[in-house]
Image: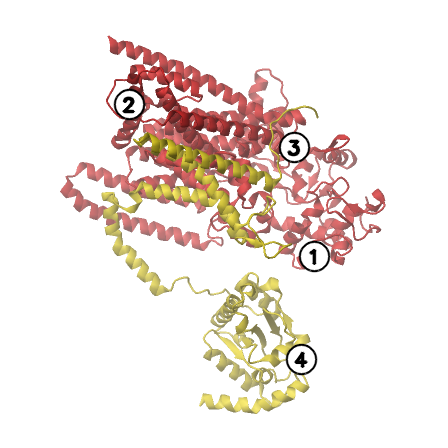
Amino acid sequence: MAASEGATESNLRHAFGNVLSFFILLLIGVLAFSIRLFSVIKYESVIHEFDPYFNYRVTQFLTKNGIYDFWNWFDDRTWYPLGRVIGGTVYPGLTLTAGTLWWILNSLNIPLSVETVCVFTAPTFSAIAAWATYLLTKEVKGTGAGLTAAALLAMVPSYISRSVAGSYDNEAVAIFALIFTFYLYIKTLNTGSLLYATLNAIAYFYMVCSWGGYTFIINLIPMHVLLCIVTGRYSSRLYIAYAPLVVLGTLLASLVPVVGFNAVMTSEHFASFLVFIVIHVVALAYYIKGILSPKMFKVAVTLVLAVGLVVCSAVIAVLIAMVASSPTKGWSGRSLSLLDPTYASKYIPIIASVSEHQPPTWPSYFMDINVLAFLVPAGIIACFLPLSDASSFMVLYIVTSVYFSGVMVRLMLVLAPAACIMSGIALSEAFDVFTRSIKCQLPGVSQNSQIDVGDSTSGSVVTQDEVVKTDKTEDSLKERPSKKNKKKERERERENVEKASIKTPIQKRLLVLPLESSVIALLLLVLLGAFYVVHCVWAAAEAYSAPSIVLTSRSHDGLHVFDDFREAYAWLSHNTEVDDKVASWWDYGYQTTAMANRTVIVDNNTWNNTHIATVGTAMSSPEKAAWEIFQSLDVKYVLVVFGGVVGYPSDDINKFLWMVRIGGGVFPHIKEPDYLRDGQYRIDSQATPTMLNCLMYKLSYYRFVETDGKGFDRVRGTEIGKKHFKLTHFEE
Amino acid sequence: MAIYARSTTTHLFLFITLLSLTIPVKPFSSSDPESILSELLTRQSQSQSGVIHLTDHLLPHILSPKTPRSFSLIIFFDAQQLHSKTDLHLPSLKSEFSLVASSFITNNKDNPDHKKLFFCDVEFKESQNTFAQFGVNALPHIRLIPPTAQNLKQDSIQMDAGDFSRLAESMAEFVESKTKLVLGPIHRPPLISTAQLMFIVAAIVTSLPFFAKKVIAGETLLHDWKLWLSGAVFVYFFSVAGTMHNIIRKMPMFMADRNDPSKLIFFYQGSGMQLGAEGLAVGSLYTIVGLMLAVMTHGLVGVRNRTVQRVMMIVALLVSFWAVRKVVVLDNWKTGYGIHAYWPSSW
């Protein structure tokens, strides 16, 4: 009788907890969405920066012409005269997602424009990513940690920087895909269900569609499998989680045109095949162990090991031969620069020139993951106590991603979910301990219930230990008593009261901390959380919401808005012929095609180094030579961005040295020292004659002296070197 | 026999060198081009790497045949006393140079090209005249003397710094472009020699069964979770400290103050750059808070003594609070950002 009453109460409690979690998740979703709207509120609903304009243009094409035309689209408006096969060279995930969203909304008679859908795709997917984080963390450490991690991820600045409204880029959906793939992998690992394994392969497919970062998944999961095998954690669940993923995942990945046969040919994927072989050998060994007597098994082990080693070494030899025969050893430049961080800066200026490929310093971590940087070590330790398959995966994830983020600041984005999950676990466990300590020692609570609470938690740890040992995790998911922890301490307290009343008392020592110090610790943690929220909102509002296509500056007489970019593109669109070619540095390629609808020579998809170098050479040549180069490319207009009047620092003069370097990399007559005076880049009267006569200087500073009479450049902070000159081969 | 022949030529041309100082590189029709070529080949084969060691006496002798000579010379100017200066990279450049030389010799063993280019080096201490003749006053310096060169200083071509930046490969490109000879691929010696490689493979193969047995028994170092734990925390510390940045950018641990050289700067203001000590300090601040928290939630709860718990908790909280505060202050100082709550008053 008492038992059934207890069961009803426990069911009720679970139901209540689930409803509460649901509403908390809903709120987290709203938070994730709304914190990213600062850009729309402060500026307007526009697409941001450079790459998103290309994605937007592709999406427009998709919605107008349908999927088949999109797949076969040859774009002649870019990389003139080469053109570009868009369908075969983009990751179509983002475009297809936004296109589908638009199509669904339109079928429901909600007439949103393509641009609106594109602007709000990223915030929507951030909310979904927060939910995926909840699922993943729940699989690792229970509901409480899951909710905390989801709340942290909803506002982590690193992710906000890539997913504010208008930032319509691959990463926006890819981070969701990444987390969801990991969730399904862990879910399969915990349940051993083939259904989840298949879903996992499909989620991986979505990730491959969305972002080049999928190679992180296809290397991390094999690493984890290998780790499990080496540390003696092999189980049939591991096999089910891994083997279908490799087979189905690779088949599906090669369906994406931009990946194609790379999925089996490049060495980024070789690790997964190698581990695929290893896991089969190990599976065979375990199988034989199961059907043979221990004595026979010893004999068999020798045999299997011998055969397995021969097979493995043969395969390794083949792989090494294949890898060694390719010039870059089969690794693409970007991946190589992760393993050998000095590689890119030495050999590939086009990679080294991008600011997001630089290694970060410690303030970057504080800016991008803020106080999570403090909490992660605690999360790592919590994952080791006790170590399960799932938590070992999380440890591996945080360690690899934190290393990679140290090499390339852009990969901070991959670190962010891991840091959120780890901090979520750490915070949840800390809240758990502190609130328990407070609850049990509050005056007025009977000694009896104190002991009960102590039991319940220590009991839960024991259960988890047993679970790990007996490899019956699927059962534990239902039994696991860790549903008790909730995000807010009040809920936790209430739950602990409830829990205390239903647990059978076992005499054990109380696992609590002193009351008053627990209160202080709790206060400090809440303070830390509050600081995180303030920082995130500040980052979202001030640091990451500028669309960089509209500029604002604040001065004593109020706010100034510069809309020069869009004015320039509109000018091109209204005043030039439809077929005219416009030359500019590659940064502005995507925007020119998307906003001005004119053909460009190079754009942000930097696939052809020679072509970019040609433009770089033209910009760094004297007028006549530049005119000849541009004439050979049918160029009628040259677009340069100059910020010396208003003080806009990322203009072409500041990017000019990279044009020289990239140009010089292909055309040796362009030499960097010719543009430097004693190793210093300057444009004032000390500048070299080569510098003062190159096309970029002339186009930028033509009639500049007429603005203020002196030719004072507000970005460089000097007067320019050559003030009065005429253009001979170009006209303004 | 060979030694004898060499010493006579040296004696003979001691006299001519003295002459050549007064009239820079006047061609000496007296020496036979064929014999000089064969002498060069002998010297090349005597040298281990195929780089001929030149002296003040030898060089004029070699260059004595009438222009156009049948061969080019490429000379590496070396100075033993500067080998210790790390920023000149002389030893590494020299080994790259000899690598190009030996690769050229092995690649062109069977065709007549191997008589058209000779790699030489000159040591500053013993051949100061040569340095003066070429007007070399800064190292590293590599010079190509084409067959047509009459005046050593004006007609020879100096290799740019850019041409040896990518080591042997770019040196080879330079030589190929200037001499129109084909050098072929560079044969770098493998990192470990074949014998060593065989030994390592053998060692691995023999140890594999033992290792496999241990793995199956589950008692290797890899099964010790404490090792993994400390490894994971260390990698975390290593990365958040920005150590990769310091390695890639070759940042020093600290630097001297520009205004006051006697003072040292450990913290650099400006977010684009950091110093080594600075990174390590902040990295440990990042890490210590998490460790303290973990100690409190996982370690201290098990301690029986209430006073110990209390004291340790207060210490941990104080340290954590101090660390977080310190990082916030440092970050605001370094980046200049003022993080503030967002109140949309007006815009």
Of the image marks 3 and 2, the number of the one nearer the N terminus: 2
From the viewer's side, name the closer residue of A18 and A494.
A494
**Alpha carbon of mark 2 to alpha carbon of mark 1: how far?**
73 Å
Q: Amino acid at mark 2?
A: Asp
Q: Amino acid at mark 3?
A: Pro
Q: Residue at x 74, y 58 (%)?
A: A688
How far apart are labels 2 and 4 at the CA level?
Answer: 96 Å
Give the residue pinned by disc 4.
Answer: B150
Residue A255 appears in the figure:
no
Chain bearing mark 1: A
Q: In this rendering, which labeled residue sits more in front, label 2 or label 4?
A: 2
**In the foreground, A302 or B231:** B231
Determine which quarter of the picture holds residue A199.
Answer: top left
User: Dot 2, crowdedness within 10 Å: few (<14), some or many (≥20)?
Assistant: many
Q: Residue furthest front?
A: B307
Q: Which mark is residue A455?
A: 2
Instruction: Give SS at disc 1.
Output: loop
Q: Which mark is residue A676?
A: 1
- Whether A327 is drawn above or below A4: the answer is below
Question: Which chain is painted in yellow?
Answer: B
